[in-house]
Image (spheres, grey):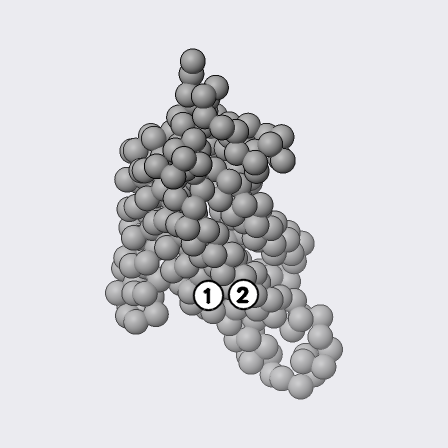
Amino acid sequence: MTASASAPRPASDLLTGATPRQLARTAGALYLVNIVLGAFAIGLVPSMLFVSDLAKTAHNIQTHETLYRLSLAAHVVVTLTNVPMALLFYELFKVVNRRLALLDVFFMLVATAVETAGILNEFTPLALLHGKTYTGALPAAQLQALEHLPGDLSSVDYSIYGIFYGFDILCVAYLVRRSTFMPRFISILLAIDGLAYLVGGFTNMIAPGVASHLGPWIQIPAPIGEGALCLWLLIVGVDVERWYLRAGEMSAGV
């Protein structure tokens, strides 16, 4: 008799009607949407529109307003995907360690709340662009400076919610390592990724000059670690028999 047949079926799994592999692949699909839209909203569009020249930045936003608005909408979708992902990760990894899986949910949701709140600042250039009151009350140079400000604040915002995401990813790294139903090499990549988030976030707040030099290197682990996790969940899922074995051990109090 296989482990999946001998291990009791968890109540939550019965309620959702989804197998662990289906939950994993759903999480992987959401993760892929998160990564692709995040690269567009947080990476591609800001790098295109925000430059060192204030007047040029204001001109770029005005000329490519639709693109800028699309990036903001995409960023909102990124934060939306985090909520069901938090639930799915909890369902997948609670059989490893329920408390740590719950802690991971808290880290992810707090990070998402901080990230979502920061999106409001990114609407500042649009408010200045279309606000007749602002246009008439402030000189053009001040308006351009204010339109550039969200781009500068976004790096600080990224550092704050990146720290919470770093702890979230470290929790997932530990859960993957202890799971037995996912490969351990992913846990190593995730641990490096989580530490990179923490180092980058705290360094940017304490020593931004140093962080500017670390920036290109500190971002390398994210697409590798999170990309590996995303693709494994989406394509392979989890080892179902071992997942049910862990569920049985949890139910038996092993």
Give the image location of residue 247, x and y in percent: 44, 33
Residue 238: tell me if it is visible.
no
Residue at 51% over, 56% down? 109
Q: Secondary structure at mark 2?
A: helix
Give the image location of residue 2, x and y in percent: 42, 16
Q: Mark 1 or mark 2: which comes first in sequence? A: 2
| Residue, disc 1 | 157
Residue at 62% over, 84% down? 138
In this picture, is 180 found above or below 129?
above
Q: Are marks 1 and 2 in contact (CB under 8 Å)?
A: yes
Give the image location of residue 99, x and y in percent: 41, 50
Give the image location of residue 111, x and y in percent: 48, 59
Report the amino acid beneath label 2. Gly
The foreground one among 52 and 36 is 36
Residue 128: tell me if it is visible.
yes
Left or right: residue 49 compared with residue 201: right
Q: Which mark is residue 170?
A: none
Q: CA distance from mark 1 to mark 2?
A: 6 Å
Res 236 → quadrant: top left
Residue at 36% over, 42% down? 175
| Residue, disc 2 | 118
Q: Quadrant of the N terminus?
A: top left
Report the amino acid beneath label 1. Asp
Q: Quadrant of the C terminus?
A: top left
